[in-house]
Structure formats: structure tokens, C-alpha cells
Image (cartoon, coloured by chain):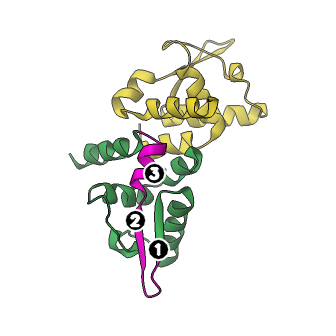
Chain colours: A green, B yellow
Amino acid sequence: MELGKVLAALADPHRRKVVTDFLAGPDDAERTCTSFNLPVSKSTLTHHFRILREAGLVLDADYGNRRGITLRRADLDERFPGLMALLENEARHFAE
Amino acid sequence: MELGKVLAALADPHRRKVVTDFLAGPDDAERTCTSFNLPVSKSTLTHHFRILREAGLVLDADYGNRRGITLRRADLDERFPGLMALLENEARHFAE
């Protein structure tokens, strides 16, 4: 994981929402790309998840008939301490 | 300050170097754009400092014959707790 790529991935509000939605749920949650209800086209959705995956923020498991997205929370916490807390804090800030 | 703009500004390694150089010095340091020795053209340097300023990371004081750049450390620590620590940690990681 490279900080530059991670920050670039998180600079986009839709990609940030994916991560903060994961952070608001159980640690080992596996979700589909569409479950985040991002208001974007299918091709844009694919693009966003590719950027998240290439930055190392999520894993994308291909089960043939569906894909399962998971947040690499433990890896992120080890490599970039404080980053997930920063995003959680920001998500709370805007929820208030 | 918006987190998206701040993260986009910090996604670039040259702009991140400006911030980590400030973090390695005294809190109230005022520096010139050229003092960071970024290996870029003058117009690219101007561009980078504009992005940093517009994101709210630095203040840029115009003294007529020179400009003084300062890091908005207190504002950043208040608005985005943990962000500066993350960058310092990363700078140490790569210095080791």
C-alpha cells in the first residue's frame, strides 16, 4: 500500500462513503458493490471499486455469480495508524 | 476546509513533502516556496502551493518582495485530528 494512492482513492466522496459505510458495520462484513447505493452509473461504480482495490483499501473476491467486497481494515490500521479513525470522525462530523 | 480537497492535495508526494517538512520543524515556521527544494519547474511549484493553499493546508502571506508560507497546523489538528500524525508517521516510516 502506498499513502499517495490511498489518499487519492479517499479524496473522492463516493469512494470515501464506501469506506465509512464499512467502518460503521462489523469488521468482517462482506458486501456487494451495489449495496452502497452510490448514485453513479454501473461503469463509474466499477471504476470506483477498481481504484479502491488498486489502492489496497478493499479486497474484491470473485465468486463467479457475485463479487464480495471487504475492507482491509486490519492491514490499513497497521500500515496507516489513525487513518480509519480520521474517516470515522469525519463521517460523524457530517452526521451531526 | 474539506476533507476531500485536503486528501487530494496530500495525494501528491511533492505536496506531502512540503507538509512533512513543516511538521519536522518548529510549529510557527514561515518558509519560502523554494526552500523545500522540490525538483519541479517554477510554474509547477506555483501550482503545488496553490493547491495546498486552496485546500487550507497552508497560509501564503504576500510581503511584496517575498512570500511567507506557514502550515495551518492548529487548524488542521482541530479539524482533522490524527491527520498530521499520520503524515509524520509515514515520513518516519520512509526515513528508516
Eye-nearest disc, 2 or 3 = 3
Range drawn in magenta? A61-81
Residue A71 picture quarter = bottom left
Identity of the residue drawn at 56% across and 21% down: B22
Between the residue at mark 1 and the residue at mark 3, the CA separation in whole angstroms equals 17 Å
Dot 1 amino acid type: Ala
Dot 2 amino acid type: Thr
Q: In which quarter of the image is the N terminus of chain B?
A: top left
| Residue A40 included in the magenta stretch of the image | no
Q: Considering only order in the chain, which callout, 3 or 2, is on the residue closer to the N terminus?
A: 2
| Residue A67 included in the magenta stretch of the image | yes
Query: Is residue A72 or residue B52 the one in the foreground?
Result: A72
Residues at marks 1 and 3 on the same chain: yes
Identity of the residue drawn at 52% across and 50% down: A6
Identity of the residue drawn at 52% across and 63% down: A53
Q: Residue B60: which numbered mark, if any?
A: none
- Residue for badge 2: A70
Q: Label 3 crowding class (10 Å Cα cut-off): few <14, some 14-19, many 20+?
A: some
Q: In which quarter of the image is the C terminus of chain B?
A: top right
Callout 1: SS: strand
Between the residue at mark 2 and the residue at mark 3, the CA separation in whole angstroms equals 12 Å
Which subunit holds the residue at mark 2? A
Q: Whole-percent x and y of residue A55?
A: 55, 56
- Residue for badge 3: A75
